Image (cartoon, rainbow, N blue to C red):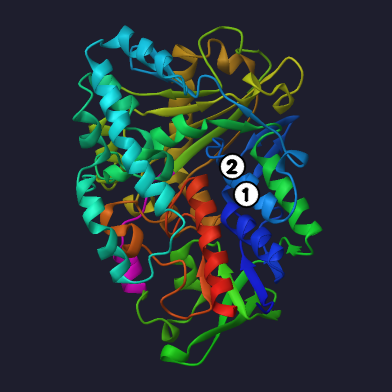
Amino acid sequence: MSARKIVIIGSGFGALGAAARLLADGHDVTLFEARDKLGGRAYTYEQDGFVFDGGPTIITAPWMFDEIWAKAGKNREDYVSFVKCDPFYRIFDDAQAFFDYNDDEMFILNEIQKRNPDDKRGYLNFMKTTKSIFEKGFVELADEPFLHFTDMLRVAPDLIRLQSYKSVYQYVSQYVKDPFLRQVFSFHPLLVGGNPFDTPSIYAMIHYLEREWGVWYALGGTGKLVEAFERLITELGGEIHVDRPVAEILVDGEGRDRRARGVRLEDGTEVRADVVVSNADVATTYMNMIAPQHRTKYTDRKLERMDYAMSLFVLYFGTDKQYRDDGLLKHHNIILGPRYEGLLRDIFKNQGRLADDFSLYLHMPSYTDPSMAPEGHESFYVLSPVPNLKSGIDWREQAKPYRDAIMNFLEANYLPGLQEHLVTEHYIDPLHFQGDLRSFRGSAFAFEPKLTQSAWFRPHNRSEEMGNLYFVGAGTHPGGGLPGVLSSSKIADKLINESVA
């Protein structure tokens, strides 16, 4: 295999995984990041002595990180430490009753017993069937490219057998009858930008994946994992450039002969490359970085007509009071509101509407890792799924009232005295995802993971427009979440090596 000069756009985990893999294969890799430090959505904010992870906080399938370090002849444990969370989540209903779960089946059955004993058998049957979904959807297909329609036809019988035509919520409801428990075992598509009422049932495997490999936390925050990748890539000889946004992918040729020949940075610098890998938002890559005459399939019209995942409102805050010993909250807390399907309809379907109620993910990393806050303090972020910018919601007007509603709710129900003890805060909203993260329509997860936008129907890992442009990250196969974007980096590495062998 001959080495290639490879340019990578962006520095999310898809880009970092691809860079490390390609460098370990002997390629010459240069990475350009538009912001002042690496991470993409995993950007880290440091404020008033607090450390806030900007994006992903839940690590599943930790072996996928170990695999990257092993390929480079290194041990991940020498770069960053993972600790297992127990419980994985504490999930609250709207009356503040909670359900904990981890990877201990008897523990979960005891939790179900408290809520609805009749659902214990149903849960066991649910787990038995999701094992088959997991083995097909993740073990067999997650790191396999879907470049041809025949790839889809090949797996279609299995997808039909596994009832992929049903939504995650419909699938769970076959086995679990309690309304709250149905929510507990069907919320997982929200972690990758999907609506549980629309996302195909193959995503029910996320719960099985958590049971199989656990839910973990990187000591020091997810930012420490980004720093570990930066160290690994540098040791392997990779070049990293921050504050260097890419303006254009340079293209030669037409039709089947079309090739990416490098990139032009916003400062005008042109960098030649044999291969370009984009971890930037797929729609933004096509619409803003590749001239229309070089695009046959992914025209502006096609991209505008695709369905995009929800956005997020995320509020990072620190307090001079510690809440970790009160006994109510854990590291990962999911607070479900009085509505489930109706709220999700407002987020995904009802354009122009910002719901008055909300469901929240409340992250308290200092529960596990006191280093995330000054001594005697507590570190939090609270995340609320919200519509993307297609909704027309004016976040310049709505952000402050929405922030106030969330803080008042938390103070009244979960964090007594919150605003009296608040010492620092910062928020991001859909405008941040559109502006700073260059995500089309401010989507936090690129394309919505529904059946008609998954696998072959999703933008391919190797561009359909030119043979030496590759995609990694949430917008390509297999989709969002850390296992998904790491799988995309593995696919890109495989395809690039096959092309130059």
Residue at the (25%, 51%) spot, across then down: 159
- Badge 2 marks a residue whose secondary structure is helix
* Magenta span: 300-311
User: Which part of the image, by quadrant, shows the C terminus?
Assistant: bottom right
Q: Is residue 35 magenta?
A: no
Residue at the (44%, 36%) spot, across then down: 209
Residue 153 screen position, x and y as percent: 25, 64
Near mark 1 (Cα within 10 A), the count class, few <14, some 14-19 or many ≥20, is: some
Mark 1 → mark 2, Cα distance in angstroms: 6 Å
- Badge 1 marks a residue whose secondary structure is helix
Instruction: Return the mark for residue 67.
Output: 1
420 to the left or right of 329 = right
Residue 398 screen position, x and y as percent: 42, 39
Residue at the (53%, 49%) spot, across then down: 432
- Marks 1 and 2 close (CB-CB < 8 Å): yes
Residue at the (56%, 37%) spot, across then down: 59
Kind of residue at disc 2: Trp
Q: Tell which of 464 and 283 is nearer to you.
A: 464
Q: Mark 2 points at which residue?
A: 63
